[in-house]
Image (cartoon, rainbow, N blue to C red):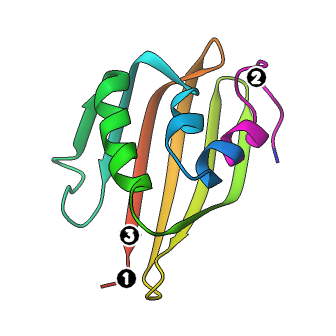
């Protein structure tokens, strides 16, 4: 686990947000002007899916958390205004998803995140 950059962000608050049953806890960690880039099989590095601002990020996370799946933070490192973490997810039918994220913080809130994800097919 890492150290906290401010009371608003820590590995523990990130874990609680990721492993919760809704996007609410996770959304409390994002700045209003946050940007999230997602790279995966469908949105490759030259054309990632990019969400700007809390509203777009919240819509995506609400969709993810509406699915019947578990989320687990595997690793997290927090250093200064940067953090990195690994998340694994499991659907009831055994399909697994793995994501790796790099984030930049400002005043204890996520302002930039790049997520690379892969899933069983």
Residue 119 against residue 46 in the figure, above or below: below
Mark 1: give few (<14), some (14-19) or many (20+) Cα within 10 Å: few
Side of 74 where 50 appears, left or right: left
SS under mark 2: loop
Q: Which residue is mark 1?
A: 120
Q: Which residue is mark 2?
A: 5
SS under mark 1: loop
Q: Residue at x 38, y 75 (%)?
A: 119
Q: Which residue is mark 3?
A: 118
How far across and how far down the image is residue 45, in percent?
Answer: 24, 52
Q: Which mark is residue 25?
A: none
Q: Nearer the viewer, mark 2 or mark 1?
A: 1
SS under mark 3: strand
Q: Is residue 57 magenta?
A: no
Say which quarter of the image contains residue 36. Answer: top left
How far across and how far down the image is residue 62, in percent?
Answer: 38, 45
Write the start and end of the magenta stretch as one range.
Answer: 2-15
Q: Is residue 4 magenta?
A: yes
- In whole angstroms, how far apart are the C-alphas of marks 2 and 3? 29 Å
Q: Earlier in the sequence, mark 2 or mark 1?
A: 2
How far across and how far down the image is residue 37, in percent?
Answer: 33, 40
- In whole angstroms, how far apart are the C-alphas of marks 2 and 1? 34 Å
Say which quarter of the image contains residue 41. Answer: bottom left
Q: Earlier in the sequence, mark 2 or mark 3?
A: 2
Q: Residue at x 31, y 38 (%)?
A: 59
Q: Residue at x 65, y 23 (%)?
A: 81
Mark 2: give few (<14), some (14-19) or many (20+) Cα within 10 Å: many
Q: Nearer the viewer, residue 46 or 62?
A: 62
Side of 2 where 111 appears, left or right: left
How far across and how far down the image is residue 29, in percent?
Answer: 58, 27
């Amino acid at each position: 686990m890492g150290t906290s950059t401010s009371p608003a962000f820590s590995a523990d608050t990130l874990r609680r947000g990721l492993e919760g049953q809704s996007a609410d806890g996770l959304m409390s960690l994002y700045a209003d002007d946050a940007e999230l880039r997602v790279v995966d099989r469908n949105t490759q590095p030259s054309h990632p899916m990019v969400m700007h601002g809390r509203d777009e990020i919240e819509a995506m996370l609400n969709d993810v958390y509406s699915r019947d799946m578990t989320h687990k933070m595997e690793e997290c490192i927090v250093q200064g205004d940067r953090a990195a973490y690994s998340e694994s997810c499991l659907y009831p039918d055994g399909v697994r998803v793995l994501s790796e994220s790099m984030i930049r913080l400002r005043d204890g809130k996520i302002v930039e995140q790049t997520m690379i994800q892969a899933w069983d097919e």
